[in-house]
Image (tube, rainbow, N blue to C red):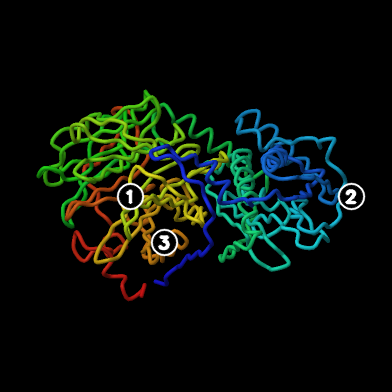
């Protein structure tokens, strides 16, 4: 297997110090890293006949820190009438956000013929056709200027790719492969896509100062898909889900444990809840499992725990932490003689640190480490004398499944600083954390979720080869696809404690008496999952020669 490498090397920005234990404002930190310290003159060229609300919101966002002029170009024709009509129908039935709503031009926006080159001015060409202005930065959809390519990609239910391109230098300043969770709604796909476009334009401002992304955007031509064909598939999909909803849960997560190389024992549930995001921890000679417990009736996750003996639970998981907002991903660790937990609290736009007052049953809030974004699956690592926090962080209202950011601090509760290359990854295939980073024999192995086909489709393992405040490099080791390795629809978390391993997986399940419970699952014989261990506790011996 060839090794995929990702490397960044960008200069650090100056940051003011904050009072100890004060929660970090992610929005403030992002602006300090990604924007110039002086006011920049920006000219934006928009397509007069293809204006969306995201264009207006982009202008308003940039005007907070820069001088912005907007110009209109008449070259790109309106979208096809059938496309415009369908988007109106779809958004009436399935409202999906304001960014994907057509708008009329503002009175202050001028014709592009009024635009003149000026020293130091940054020109963003969002007109969807080539422009003659030197140094203009272009937004490209799957490698082309025309946003019809984006609509065609969404019609084919493929993963859209975006890039801010600098034609003069033939370089990519910012790029992203976006996770689309619902691939049967064009409006929702456009909403997520346009949210990411706002962040890419914002991110490229720092790249215009010399921070050029090294990776190229690989494009693939969408399959031939007509609007009529998409509509028929969407109607069939939605109708099937609607009819089966009283009888079946399409995505039900479950947790399973195994000792050594045995089959996994599935933790039973009553059908009224699911268990996911498992973490193991051993204290005072006893082993405990922590999980997200999601009661369907409450529509809100809590953190639950149970004692483990061999590879089975002593009792069903019991609640150990509840908040007014959703909780998941209970990352548990020990430091300075105390037990700590960082659960996911993205619904509260925060990263929160809890301390055990009676491990593992009682916890209290110790500090808010960061705030100001939707943070998901925060994963802590101690390396080279620093604390490192790997997490997804969305502040533009787009996907939480496809961008990885890193923060670091000298102390656990102290001043958390953003990595100079954040987000260090923007790719739906291997960004969002999928469990504890494994440190073994001086090496670091990071599990990441593959959310390209669907949320939590599988786990992709990387070896971190360099981690400093200005550099991050890792190489791909192996894929654990849920369908291929477990014959399940998804696999998105892994943890281990010596020979004890735990995973979660998803599958459709029927409700009530029609449900077919499973008690064990066995990874595919000779598959990547089993080949990843020389024994139950040692990682990746079979792939050493492939990844050297």
User: Badge 1 is on which residue?
Assistant: 435
| Tag 2 secondary structure | helix
In this rendered view, identify the residue nearer to me: 202 or 180. 202
Indicate which disc, 1 or 3, sits on the residue closer to the N terminus: 1
Question: As displayed, is residue 313 above or below residue 2?
Answer: above
User: Badge 3 is on which residue?
Assistant: 468
State the residue at coordinates (31%, 70%).
Answer: 543
Horizontal side of residue 262 vs 195, given as left or right: left
In this rendered view, identify the residue nearer to me: 304 or 267. 304
Horizontal side of residue 527 vs 10, given as left or right: left
* Mark 2: few/some/many CA within 10 Å (<14, 14-19, 20+): few
Q: CA distance from mark 1 to mark 2?
A: 53 Å
Looking at the image, is mark 1 or mark 2 nearer the viewer?
A: 2
| Tag 3 secondary structure | loop
Q: In which quadrant is the N terminus drawn?
A: bottom left
Indicate which disc, 1 or 2, sits on the residue closer to the N terminus: 2
Would you identify the image quadrant in which residue 250 lies?
top left
Would you identify the image quadrant in which residue 534 lies?
bottom left
Would you identify the image quadrant in which residue 337 lies?
top left
| Tag 1 secondary structure | loop
In the rendered image, the residue lying farthest to the right is 113
Question: As displayed, is residue 102 above or below residue 197?
Answer: above
* Numbered disc total: 3
- Where residue 402 appears, as percent x and y from the top left, is 49, 50
Q: Are marks 1 and 3 in contact (CB under 8 Å)?
A: no
User: Badge 2 is on which residue?
Assistant: 114
């Amino acid at each position: 297997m060839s090794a995929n490498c990702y490397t960044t090397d960008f200069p650090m920005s100056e940051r003011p110090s904050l009072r100890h234990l004060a929660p970090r404002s992610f929005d403030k930190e992002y602006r300090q890293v990604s924007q110039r310290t002086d006011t920049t003159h920006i000219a934006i060229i928009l397509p007069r006949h293809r204006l969306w609300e995201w264009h207006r919101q982009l202008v308003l966002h940039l005007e907070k820190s820069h001088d912005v002029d907007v110009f209109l170009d008449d070259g790109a024709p309106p979208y096809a009438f059938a496309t415009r009509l369908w988007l109106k129908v779809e958004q009436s039935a399935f409202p999906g956000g304001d960014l994907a709503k057509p708008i009329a031009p503002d009175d202050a926006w001028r014709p592009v013929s009024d635009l003149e080159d000026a020293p130091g001015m940054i020109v963003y060409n969002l007109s969807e056709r080539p422009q003659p202005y030197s140094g203009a930065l272009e937004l490209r959809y799957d490698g082309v200027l025309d946003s019809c390519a984006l609509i065609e990609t969404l019609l084919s239910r493929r993963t859209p790719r975006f890039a801010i391109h600098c034609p003069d230098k033939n370089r990519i300043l910012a790029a992203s492969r976006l996770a689309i969770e619902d691939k049967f709604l064009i409006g929702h796909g456009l909403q997520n896509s346009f949210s990411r476009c706002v962040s890419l334009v914002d991110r490229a401002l720092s790249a215009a100062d010399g921070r050029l992304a090294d990776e190229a955007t690989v494009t693939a031509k969408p399959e031939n898909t007509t609007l009529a064909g998409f509509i028929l598939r969407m109607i069939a999909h939605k109708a099937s889900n609607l009819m089966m909803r009283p009888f079946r849960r399409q995505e039900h997560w479950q947790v399973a444990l195994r000792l050594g190389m045995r089959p996994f024992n599935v933790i039973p549930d009553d059908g009224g809840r699911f268990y996911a995001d498992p973490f193991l921890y051993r204290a005072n000679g006893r082993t405990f499992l922590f999980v997200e417990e999601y009661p369907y009736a409450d529509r809100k996750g809590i953190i639950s725990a149970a004692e483990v003996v061999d590879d089975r639970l002593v009792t069903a998981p019991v609640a150990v932490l509840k908040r007014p907002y959703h909780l998941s991903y209970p990352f548990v660790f020990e430091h300075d003689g105390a037990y700590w937990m960082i659960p996911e609290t993205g619904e509260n736009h925060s990263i929160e640190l809890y301390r055990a007052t009676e491990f593992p049953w009682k916890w209290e809030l110790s500090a808010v480490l960061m705030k100001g974004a939707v943070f998901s699956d925060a994963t802590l690592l101690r390396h080279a004398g620093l604390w490192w926090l790997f997490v997804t962080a969305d502040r533009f209202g787009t996907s939480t499944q496809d961008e990885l950011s890193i923060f670091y601090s000298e102390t656990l509760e102290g001043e958390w600083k953003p990595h100079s290359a954040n987000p260090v990854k923007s790719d739906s295939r291997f960004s969002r954390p999928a469990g504890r980073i494994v440190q073994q024999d001086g090496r670091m192995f990071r599990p990441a979720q593959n959310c390209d086909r669907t949320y939590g489709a599988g786990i992709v393992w990387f070896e971190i080869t360099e981690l400093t405040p200005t550099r991050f490099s890792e190489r791909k080791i192996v894929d654990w696809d849920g369908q291929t390795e477990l014959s399940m629809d998804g696999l998105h978390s892994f943890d281990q404690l010596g020979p004890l391993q735990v995973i979660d997986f998803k599958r459709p399940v029927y409700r009530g008496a029609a449900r077919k419970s499973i008690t064990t699952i066995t990874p595919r014989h000779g598959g990547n999952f089993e080949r990843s261990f020389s024994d139950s506790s040692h990682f990746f011996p079979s792939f050493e020669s492939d990844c050297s």
